[in-house]
Image: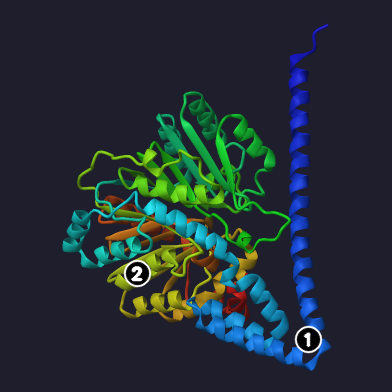
């Protein structure tokens, strides 16, 4: 007697659901154990030092001297003052606990191994790219300020040159970007690289997964890279096994382990797709349902992206290889030049600079890009960000631009995905910014997740970088700065259309009187 094939498939599906549920339960348990282990380690160190402190008056004096030395060390560090003063206050108020926490969390030497590894990788990758002097000179003759910005980005580590031969297309809606990705993926002949903070193995990702499986069978090299924490709420470890089973080379960025690592606080927030070295994408959206309106947890989800076609894609390739090779030793034959392509030059495309930032460098490149746009603005700067936790440098530049008569507008969500951050931090900046002349808008249709800057019809940047401390100082991020091309106007027009359906917060609004000094003080420590 033959078994019913329908019932057989139903039993398989039920087994898969149980397996996935068990996998998710195991992952939650693993997270709980890691959190518990971290607290145990921290509590042990604090109690040890408290016991030593009570054991002898000399030890007590020594601990307080160490605390003073640490405060001086923090004060002398090359870092944003918003990070310095919370640590100084905390160590000064609670010398023993503060000193232990700083040595455990805030000390840069805890990341020295990762810093040296990335430094070595970046030095290796830099030899495969160079700045075309003619392109830079041409931009300098057209606009010296823009050329200086391009020089500043390239000088960061030599991986991000200025390109003048690459087409930049802006997608005002995430779903349009996703559909374009699927069309371009179908054309892949040699390799596909994908690096995403979060992937959800559901409706939005499935068409891409099907294409990746098809391309692997055709002999295309496919590499998939995702962040362990970013994807935690969407997928479990069985996803890694599934992808590898299809022949997709898959790695997980900085996986959480029971052995506490300080580096675990630094996540890969980048969103990059590269196809054959000819086409590249980046932007704000992850590959999960909520980003494309399949689910609606926070009203209408607004997100954006850019597509590059041309030689600038090579910079995205190097950005991908940086993290790919840092998280695991590269293959013997993994030579960057195998994936760098000399594309046919496209005339009259304007200029662009793909760039990336890392928490291991002392100069926050992503923030510098934003600050330079504000510094050079003469007519307007329009900004979109889902989260608003500002450094003193950013507040000052926003205010100075407004004082010069620049039309500075800042667009935040109307419906937040994280209410604590929204009410505790984002809205706490409204009062000060409005008083300085900055105009604030809340996007009433829903959650605005777009990360955009545009200025003077000359330059814009689209990418993964939020205006908060985690993006600017603690995460691995990326973006594209583009100048003097049609995509700049597309970003401007999109932001203006968003403002039309947004609520402007005025100085008479109750929200403009809300402040939280304590929240701002502890923000850099979170």
**Which residue is rendered at x = 54% and y = 44% of the image?**
225
Q: Which disc number belongs to residue 343?
A: none
Q: Position of residue 220 (x, y in %)?
A: 46, 29
Left or right: where 143 falls relative to 157: left
Identify whether 281 is placed above or below 447: above
Depth check, front residue: 394 or 121: 121
Q: How many marks?
A: 2
Depth check, front residue: 436 or 305: 305
Quarter-wise, where is residue 294 in the image? Answer: top right
Kindly tell me whether residue 105 is visible in this rendering.
yes
Depth check, front residue: 63 or 462: 63
Left or right: where 150 falls relative to 3: left
Kindly tell me whether residue 476 is visible in this rendering.
no
Q: Quadrant of the C terminus?
A: bottom right
Depth check, front residue: 33 or 270: 33
| Eye-nearest disc, 1 or 2 | 1
> Quick check: marks 1 and 2 in contact, CB under 8 Å?
no
The disc, 1 or 2, on the residue closer to the chain's N-terminal end is 1
Q: Position of residue 35 (x, y in %)?
A: 74, 61
Left or right: where 387 falls relative to 31: left
Residue extending furthest toward the top: 1
Look at mark 1 in the image and give the residue it sits on: 53
Look at mark 2 in the image and give the residue it sits on: 372
């Amino acid at each position: 007697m033959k078994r019913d094939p329908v019932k057989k498939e139903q039993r398989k599906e039920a087994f898969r659901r149980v397996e996935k549920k068990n996998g998710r339960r195991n992952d939650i348990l693993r997270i709980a154990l890691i959190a518990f282990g971290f607290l145990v380690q921290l509590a042990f160190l604090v109690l040890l030092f408290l016991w030593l402190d009570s054991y002898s008056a000399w030890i007590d004096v020594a601990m307080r001297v160490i605390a003073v030395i640490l405060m001086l060390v923090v004060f002398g560090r090359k870092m944003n003052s918003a990070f310095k003063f919370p640590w100084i206050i905390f160590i000064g108020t609670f010398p023993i606990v503060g000193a232990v926490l700083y040595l455990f969390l805030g000390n840069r030497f805890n990341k020295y191994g990762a810093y040296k590894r990335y430094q070595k990788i970046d030095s290796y990758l830099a030899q495969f790219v160079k700045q075309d002097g003619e392109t830079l000179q041409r931009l300098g003759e057209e606009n010296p300020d823009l050329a200086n910005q391009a020089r500043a980005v390239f000088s960061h580590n030599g991986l991000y040159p200025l390109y003048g031969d690459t087409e930049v297309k802006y997608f005002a809606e995430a779903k349009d970007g996703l559909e374009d990705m699927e069309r371009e993926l179908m054309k892949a002949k040699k390799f596909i690289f994908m690096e995403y903070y979060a992937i959800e193995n559901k409706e939005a990702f499935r068409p891409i997964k099907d294409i990746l499986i098809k391309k692997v069978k055709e002999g295309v090299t496919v590499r998939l890279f995702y962040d362990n924490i970013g994807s935690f709420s969407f997928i479990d470890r069985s996803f890694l096994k599934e992808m590898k089973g299809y022949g997709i080379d898959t790695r997980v960025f900085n996986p959480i382990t029971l052995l506490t690592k300080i580096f675990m606080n630094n996540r890969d927030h980048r969103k990059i797709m590269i196809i054959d070295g000819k086409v590249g994408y980046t932007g704000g959206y992850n590959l999960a349902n909520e980003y494309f309106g399949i689910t609606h947890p926070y009203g209408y989800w607004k997100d954006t992206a850019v597509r590059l076609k041309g030689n600038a894609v090579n910079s995205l390739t190097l950005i991908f290889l940086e993290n790919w090779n840092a998280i695991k030793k590269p293959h013997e034959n993994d030579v960057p030049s195998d994936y760098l392509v000399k594309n046919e030059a496209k005339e009259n495309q304007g200029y662009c600079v793909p760039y990336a930032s890392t928490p291991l460098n002392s100069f926050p490149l992503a923030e510098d890009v934003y600050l330079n746009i504000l510094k050079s603005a003469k007519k307007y700067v329009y900004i979109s960000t889902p989260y608003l936790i500002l450094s003193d440098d950013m507040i000052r530049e926003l205010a100075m631009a407004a004082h010069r008569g620049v039309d500075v507008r800042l667009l935040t969500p109307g419906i937040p995905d994280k209410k604590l951050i929204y009410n505790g931090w984002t809205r706490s900046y409204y009062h000060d910014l409005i008083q300085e002349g900055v105009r604030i808008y809340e996007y009433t249709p829903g959650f605005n997740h777009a990360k955009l800057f545009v200025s003077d019809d000359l330059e814009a940047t689209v990418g993964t970088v939020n205006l908060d401390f985690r993006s600017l100082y603690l995460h691995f991020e990326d973006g594209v700065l583009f100048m003097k091309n049609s995509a700049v106007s597309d970003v401007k027009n999109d932001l203006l259309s968003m403002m039309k359906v947004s609520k402007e917060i005025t100085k008479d609004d109750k929200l403009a009187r809300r402040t939280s000094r304590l929240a701002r003080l502890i923000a850099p420590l979170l």
